């Protein structure tokens, strides 16, 4: 018989070691599908590593991919900290991107130090508003935010599609449903010559450290932690749960919106409906792998991005489906969840003994 | 403590249960340390101990929920032979005739008493149910024991005392030979408790053995034959009840002398809190108040007695600033309250001690220091430009830990590591340190051990001495009678006039708690299921 006994106080080795171990374990597990696909396993791992870290270019690609993941990961982390289950980062990302396009395609013009903050604020605001709505429904009427935010993703995507076929359509796009390009002064400049990694990475890193300080050291962060851990006690002590939730919604939606800004103004240059291959959803995984820690989000986003980029390039080289990347990411999430359980509980195997 | 006086009324009847050398460790914590316990046929054994003394662990081992690291459980089987109980097998315990009545009942509210009792004992693959056999058996059980309940009523229509009887019948119907009752009187009025004791005595006389887990000493002395006291996982004493007295058991439980808190004379001052005709109607008796009038003065403890679920929650929510009245006025410090807001209340010098200290009183994952400062983080003392002043927060916590003797690894430890008593000390430190003028104490000592209880009482009396008005909501009559100046009774959302404690007696209080007004007003209905007064 198997039984689970709670651990009184898991040590730091367990708390920090388990996610790392889970990630490594998941990568090792990937050997099974690789073997099933008939690929040379050792070579495949080698190709994955060189694909993500083998050259300045591949590392730049990996960092480019990590940038939106850090931002959507932070969006999920802060929301989940407060037990606001924001599944709508994908929609908030697109709204942020669309706001950046509206502001950044020539309506106003100015130097970069005006334009970049302008599109960032516009994108963050749009993302924030997208989440404040469902949050108000939750606090006022008890509407489940998982449902509303998830469904809003589809509504937003269709709305974006509609706009790209209509008001926002680039007349020069030869019929493609895409927006006009972001003007040069609003483009997030690349960090390296002829590489794609751009200013968005710095913004994401600043956001992560800012959020870490915010949560740990400010009154609002204190209230967010209190509401998230025990809303009843927070309420009893006089903290307004509604106000705190709205603050969290603004932060979370805003960060997801920034991810959209960073993609549209840093990586792509224009808006199309394939802007995000599910960064909003992947952000949830990133946040869970990071155990909702803002600094941890950076590390887990880098991990997820390298798996994606590495597996992509490996699959091209040896002809294995690139879905392997999704598989590894999903397996590491499962491993982390199981690991999290094992940090909290001890497993005991009792042998059935006969009485006597 | 010796068990020398063995002769009195029982000349060693046959042994039913023997726990020998039971040891159970959870990591470094020794929950049970070589505990021996025997129960004979027809004997009522009280298992006494503070929280964390190991009572629950021991019972969980008996029921096979835990496996003991060392030691054996032996039961006399129905043929009269001693038999080891298979460890870790709840079914074995049930088969051996061990039944448990939990503190929180495990009844399906929408089914009748009969349904609940036979549930799980009937074969599934039969289309028709024949319950005549069950009814005959239950009728026998009821007439033999005095456990009278209308078994055809759905359970939600029964009073708490009746539900408990259904639970006991459920165990007896399954041929229990040993009944374990976990804190059986926690939810009962004094009269209901007394009648439970009569029933238990009768059952014991017919040969049933009973283990009662308790921490109220007076009850234990009233009902049990023998008392076993646990402390810190060890059995520290065992005695015949006839040889025991209140004080010696209390000291045995706590391991040191327990200071008794007593009120000193004090003339109450000006009114601090006045409720006039306050009505809160939430369509549910436990969350409603009907035309409540109440005055509490400086330097006075006003006790609110009542069986749980009679509107105490509504009163507490109101005074905590979490709810506002539908009609009527609340005056605090001679000003009518217009804004009911927990933050405002806390900042205006109202100390609020929540009923459920784990659920409403602390954030487990936050540190002790953060939990102490939680009401005041927005004040200038603890933040600058929105950034928390951790030095100030920690300094306050260090002081509070010292002053209130909060046992914890330090101000940075997670609050979840604290025991119930220490959480309560933490909450007292949080709210009393600001010398409040009005204190709402909702069940402040419930579930606490004797030592922590006396500490809570001492603090409340000290605050009273310093001029605070204290509203003490409690279900523990001993507590109310010991420290309150006046007592009002709450029943079905109505609050009686406050009566000076010195002019009150227990049975009168018990009747009022059951909804019967003794003299002055109209003769109220007899059963406590019927609510006097319609909702307006």
Image (spheres, rainbow, N blue to C red):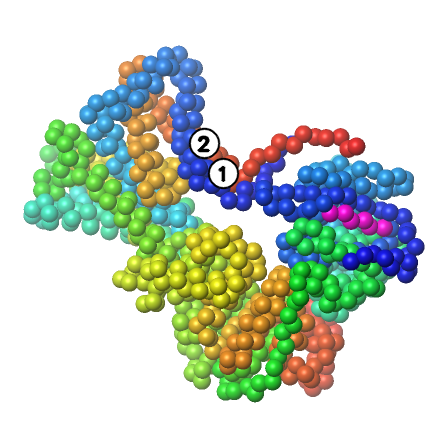
Q: Which residue is painted at 50% across and 81% down in the image?
A: B467
Q: How many marks?
A: 2
Of A242 and A55, which appears nearest the observer? A55
Look at the image and give the residue range highlighted in magenta.
B35-40
**Image quadrant for the N terminus of chain B?**
bottom right
Q: Real-space Cα distance between discs 2 and 1?
A: 12 Å
Helix, strand or loop for disc 2: helix
**Vertical placement of residue A200 versus B442, above or below:** above
Labels 2 & 1 near each other (Cβ < 8 A): no
* Earlier residue among tags 2 and 1: 2
Q: Is residue A191 magenta?
A: no
Chain letter of the residue beneath label 2 in the structure image:
A
Q: Which residue is painted at 25% across and 29% down in the image?
A: A62
Q: Report the mark closest to the observer, 2 or 1.
A: 1
Helix, strand or loop for disc 1: helix
Locate residue A278 relative to residue B300 in the image: left or right.
left
Q: Which residue is painted at 63% across and 74% down in the image?
A: B261
Residue B522 numbered mark, or none: none
Chain letter of the residue beneath label 1 in the structure image:
A
Asked if one can make out residue B289 in the rendered structure from this viewpoint, the answer is no
**Vertical placement of residue B270 versus A320, above or below:** below
Asked if one can make out residue B264 in the rendered structure from this viewpoint, the answer is yes
Locate residue A117 relative to residue A145 in the image: left or right.
left
User: Are tags 2 and 1 found on a single chain?
Assistant: yes
Q: Which residue is mark 2?
A: A335
Q: Is residue B38 magenta?
A: yes
**Quarter-of-image position of residue B487:** bottom right
**Vertical placement of residue B296 versus A12, above or below:** below
Q: Which residue is mark 1?
A: A343
């Amino acid at each position: 018989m198997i039984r689970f006994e709670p651990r009184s106080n898991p040590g730091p080795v367990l708390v920090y070691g388990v996610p790392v171990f889970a990630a490594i374990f998941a990568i090792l597990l990937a050997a099974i599908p690789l073997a099933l696909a008939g690929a040379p396993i050792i070579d495949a791992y080698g190709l994955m590593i060189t694909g993500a870290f083998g050259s300045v270019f591949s590392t730049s690609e990996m960092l480019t991919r990590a940038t939106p993941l850090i931002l959507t990961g932070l969006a999920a982390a802060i929301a989940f900290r407060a037990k606001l289950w924001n599944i709508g980062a994908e929609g908030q990302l697109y709204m942020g991107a669309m706001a950046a396009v509206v502001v950044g395609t020539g309506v106003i013009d100015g130097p970069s130090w005006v334009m970049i903050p302008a599109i960032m604020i516009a994108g963050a605001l749009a993302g924030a508003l997208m989440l404040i709505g469902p949050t108000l429904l939750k606090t006022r009427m008890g509407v489940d935010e998982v449902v509303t935010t998830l469904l809003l993703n589809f509504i937003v995507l269709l709305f974006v599609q509609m706009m790209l076929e209509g008001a926002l359509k680039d007349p020069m796009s030869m019929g493609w449903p895409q927006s006009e390009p972001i003007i040069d002064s609003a483009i997030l400049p690349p960090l390296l010559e002829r590489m794609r990694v751009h200013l968005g990475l710095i913004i994401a890193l600043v956001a992560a450290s800012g959020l870490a300080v915010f949560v740990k050291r400010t009154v609002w962060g204190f209230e967010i932690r209190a509401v998230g851990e025990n809303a009843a006690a927070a309420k009893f002590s006089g903290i307004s749960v509604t106000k705190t939730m709205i603050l969290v919604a603004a932060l979370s939606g805003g960060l997801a919106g920034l991810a959209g800004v960073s993609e549209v103004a840093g990586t792509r240059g224009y808006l199309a409906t394939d802007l995000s291959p599910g960064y909003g959803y992947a952000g949830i995984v990133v946040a869970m792998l990071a155990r909702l820690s803002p600094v941890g989000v950076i590390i887990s986003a880098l991990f997820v991005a390298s798996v994606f980029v590495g597996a992509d390039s490996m699959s091209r080289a040896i002809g294995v489906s690139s879905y392997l990347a999704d598989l590894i990411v999903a397996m590491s999430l499962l491993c982390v969840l199981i690991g999290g359980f094992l940090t909290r509980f001890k497993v005991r195997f009792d042998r059935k003994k006969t009485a006597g | 403590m010796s068990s020398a006086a063995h002769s009195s009324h029982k000349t060693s009847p046959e042994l039913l249960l023997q726990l020998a050398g039971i040891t159970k460790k959870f990591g470094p914590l020794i929950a049970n340390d070589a505990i021996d316990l025997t129960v004979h046929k027809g004997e009522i054994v009280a298992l006494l101990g503070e929280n964390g003394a190991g009572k629950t662990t021991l019972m969980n081992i008996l029921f096979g929920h835990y496996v003991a690291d060392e030691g054996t459980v032996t039961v006399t089987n129905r043929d009269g032979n001693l038999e080891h109980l298979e460890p870790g097998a709840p079914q074995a315990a049930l088969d051996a005739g061990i039944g448990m009545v939990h503190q929180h009942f495990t009844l399906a509210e929408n089914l009748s008493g009969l349904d609940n009792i036979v549930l799980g004992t009937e074969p599934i693959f039969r289309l028709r149910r024949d319950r005549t056999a069950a009814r005959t058996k239950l009728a026998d059980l009821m007439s033999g024991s005095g456990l009278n309940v209308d078994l055809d009523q759905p359970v939600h229509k029964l009073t708490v005392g009746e539900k408990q009887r259904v639970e006991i019948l459920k165990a007896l119907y399954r041929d229990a030979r040993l009944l374990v009752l976990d804190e059986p009187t926690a939810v009962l009025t004094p009269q209901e408790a007394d009648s439970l004791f009569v029933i238990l005595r009768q059952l014991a006389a017919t040969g049933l053995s009973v283990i009662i887990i308790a921490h109220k000493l007076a009850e234990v002395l009233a009902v049990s034959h023998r008392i076993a006291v646990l402390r810190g996982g060890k059995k520290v004493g065992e005695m015949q009840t006839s040889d025991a007295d209140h004080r010696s058991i209390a000291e045995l439980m706590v391991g040191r002398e327990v200071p008794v808190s007593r009120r000193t004379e004090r003339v109450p001052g000006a009114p601090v809190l006045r409720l006039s005709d306050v009505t809160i109607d939430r369509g549910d008796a436990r969350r409603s108040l009907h035309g409540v009038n109440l005055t509490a003065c400086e330097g006075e403890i006003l006790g609110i007695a009542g069986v749980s679920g009679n509107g105490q929650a509504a009163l507490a929510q109101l005074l905590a600033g979490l709810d506002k009245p539908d009609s009527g006025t609340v005056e605090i410090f001679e000003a009518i309250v217009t804004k009911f807001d927990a933050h405002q209340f806390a900042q205006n010098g109202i100390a609020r001690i929540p009923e459920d200290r784990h659920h409403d009183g602390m954030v487990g994952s936050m540190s002790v220091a953060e939990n102490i400062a939680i009401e005041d983080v927005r004040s200038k003392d603890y933040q600058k430009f929105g950034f928390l002043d951790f030095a100030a927060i920690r300094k306050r916590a260090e002081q509070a830990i010292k002053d209130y003797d909060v046992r914890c690894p330090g101000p940075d430890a997670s609050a979840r590591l604290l025991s119930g008593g220490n959480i309560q000390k933490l909450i007292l430190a949080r709210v009393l340190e600001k010398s409040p003028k009005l204190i709402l104490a909702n069940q402040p000592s419930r579930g606490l051990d004797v030592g922590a209880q006396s500490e809570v009482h001492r603090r409340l009396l000290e605050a009273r001495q310093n001029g605070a008005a204290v509203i003490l909501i409690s279900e523990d009559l001993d507590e109310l009678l010991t420290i309150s100046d006046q007592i009002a009774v709450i029943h079905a959302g109505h609050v009686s006039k406050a009566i000076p404690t010195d002019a009150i007696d227990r049975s009168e209080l018990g009747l009022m708690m059951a909804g019967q007004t003794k003299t002055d007003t109209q003769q109220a209905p007899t059963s406590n299921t019927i609510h006097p007064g319609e909702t307006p």
